[in-house]
Image (tube, helix red, strand yellow):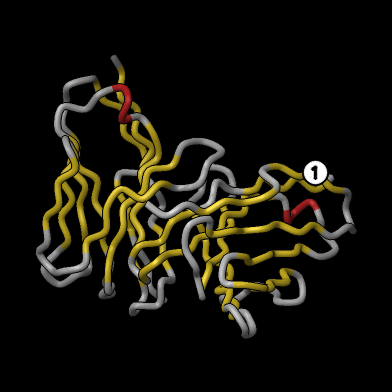
Amino acid sequence: GAVVSQHPSRVICKSGTSVKIECRSLDFQATTMFWYRQFPKQSLMLMATSNEGSKATYEQGVEKDKFLINHASLTLSTLTVTSAHPEDSSFYICSAGLHPYEQYFGPGTRLTVT
Amino acid sequence: TQLLEQSPQFLSIQEGENLTVYCNSSSVFSSLQWYRQEPGEGPVLLVTVVTGGEVKKLKRLTFQFGDARKDSSLHITAAQPGDTGLYLCAGERSNTGKLIFGQGTTLQVKP
């Protein structure tokens, strides 16, 4: 299967600061990547679709100015959590795929905002 | 809004038993994927079913997609402790790659 990486795997930041999370497709190109968040003991919730060369599209209820997404190349998408607050603490996971129906997930980034 | 109801949400069984996990929706999905997720890691794709009525087997795991592409099941035969984990079903919206996840099933297989 295709390999997707994320960096960092864990990050702790202070309230009010911004954090950038990278998602890379290692052995294939992806014009579209997806960002999800997962709270403890809950399932994954789609946040936004990252589109290479164009603006990201956000799911209802997700603040685009809070969660900035940039799809700089066919192998890299970044999610920046701006002015982070403790309620933003979560497990953030990206996915990418060769086909729409074969999505491969990164290992996730655990964000803790103190 | 498309919803995917997954059941049961928790299952604890003895080694050697069989089990079935269900995912149901009132909506049609263009495909349905099953994942397994370990704590602190991203989900790992087990299988994708695309055609209504499709059945796929992966060793002791059997996956089925409903004829109407609204529901799916995962059946595990002779469960082993190594099968312990969180199983997630996810329906794909209209060939977009966007996935709607079920609530997940936490499976515990006791030796």
Q: Position of residue B22 (x, y in %)?
A: 24, 51
Counting the numbered discs, the total is 1
Relative to A85, is A67 above or below?
below
Single out the residue that lies furthest toward the front.
A27
Q: Residue at x 70, y 42 (%)?
A: A10
Q: Position of residue A97 (x, y in %)?
A: 42, 64
Circle 1 crowding by C-alpha within 10 Å: few under 14, some 14–19, many from 20: few
Asked if residue B100 lies left or right of residue B29, the reply is right
Q: Position of residue B99 (x, y in %)?
A: 41, 66
In the foreground, B8 or A67: A67
Q: Quadrant of residue A70?
A: bottom right
SS category of the residue bearing label 1:
strand
Asked if residue A63 lies left or right of residue B61, the reply is right
Asked if residue B68 lies left or right of residue A59, the reply is left
Q: Quadrant of residue A40?
A: top right
For badge 1, the amino acid type reads Ile
Single out the residue that lies furthest toward the top.
B111
Q: Residue at x 59, y 57 (%)?
A: A37
Quarter of the image for the C terminus of chain B: give it: top left
Relative to A102, is A40 above or below?
above
In the foreground, B60 or A25: A25
Quarter of the image for the N terminus of chain B: give it: bottom left
Q: Position of residue B37 (x, y in %)?
A: 43, 42
Q: Residue at x 11, y 68 (%)?
A: B67
Single out the residue that lies furthest toward the bottom.
A54
Q: Residue at x 9, y 64 (%)?
A: B53
What residue sits right under mark 1 in the picture? Answer: A12
The chain holding disc 1 is A
